[in-house]
Image: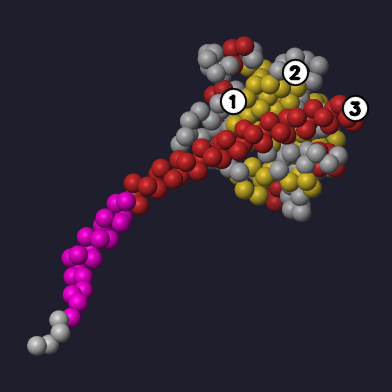
Amino acid sequence: MRPSRPRGFTLIELLVVIAIVALLVGILLPSLSAAREMMRHAQVRVELDGLGKALRMYEIDLDQGLPPARASCNPDMIGHENQLPVELAEAGYVRRSDDPRRMADAEDPFNREHSYKYTAPGGMVVNNTLMPEASYVWVPHAFPNGETLDGPLDTTDDGALYNRRNDSPIRWVLWSTGPDPNAEKVLSSRAPVSRRCWYRRTGDSGVIALIESENEQWVLSP
């Protein structure tokens, strides 16, 4: 008698296996993506807290006030506006970046090759030139009491632009662009202070912001 040969898979069996694998991948991928997003969100909150402390130490140690915001008309710098101030790197609170497009090496996990963002009412460096009171920040009139997690959402006209630090209810803002750097909420003129622009839940877009108010209390978006 001839020895029997092991039977291979038939075409139908292979198609069934492929279909099962595809189904499992389709089920697992959204869960893995959501878990990755949650991990990045947690990382951002921790790193923003550290950067906020660095800003405070910068003010106390050097007694030079807050660093200016930054902007550029260079097309190669699109997306790098309001980058983390180089002064923090020069003072040793964060590392200096080797990338000429960003000066401080504190990369936003949601926006690779871009630093976390920073702004404050007052001076702005535009193309290496300091322009006094050129940095405007939109702040809701209800901030901070009405802008807490449980407070009412601001309306589009219930706020004002501030470019003088002595007049503004906030001192500075640090933020991440969140999962979608090009989302409408992220690019809104109301970002990053308005709750309408905040990241709210997994799968959503919006900024993750750390805000210091005039009485030096921090407001961290959800």
Residue, disc 3 = 63
Cβ–Cβ below 8 Å for labels 3 and 2? no
> If you read the primary sequence from the N terminus, does the residue marked by circle 2 or circle 1 appear first?
2
> If you read the primary sequence from the N terminus, does the residue marked by circle 3 or circle 1 appear first?
3
- Look at 52% across and 15% down and name the residue there: 150
> If you read the primary sequence from the N terminus, does the residue marked by circle 3 or circle 2 appear first?
3
- Look at 74% across and 53% down and name the residue there: 99
- Look at 58% across and 32% down and name the residue there: 207
Identify the image quadrant of the C terminus: top right
Which segment is the magenta one?
5-24
Dot 3: element: loop
- In the rendered structure, which amino acid carries the disc numbered 1? Ser
Percent x, y of residue 38: 51, 37
The CA distance from mark 3 to mark 2 is 16 Å
Dot 2: element: loop
The CA distance from mark 2 to mark 1 is 16 Å
Residue, disc 1 = 221
- Which of the 4 quarters of the picture holds residue 169? top right
54 vs 190, left or right, is right
Name the foreground residue: 70 vs 51: 51
- Which of the 4 quarters of the picture holds residue 40? top right
Cβ–Cβ below 8 Å for labels 2 and 1? no
Residue, disc 2 = 216
Identify the image quadrant of the N terminus: bottom left
Name the foreground residue: 158 vs 116: 116
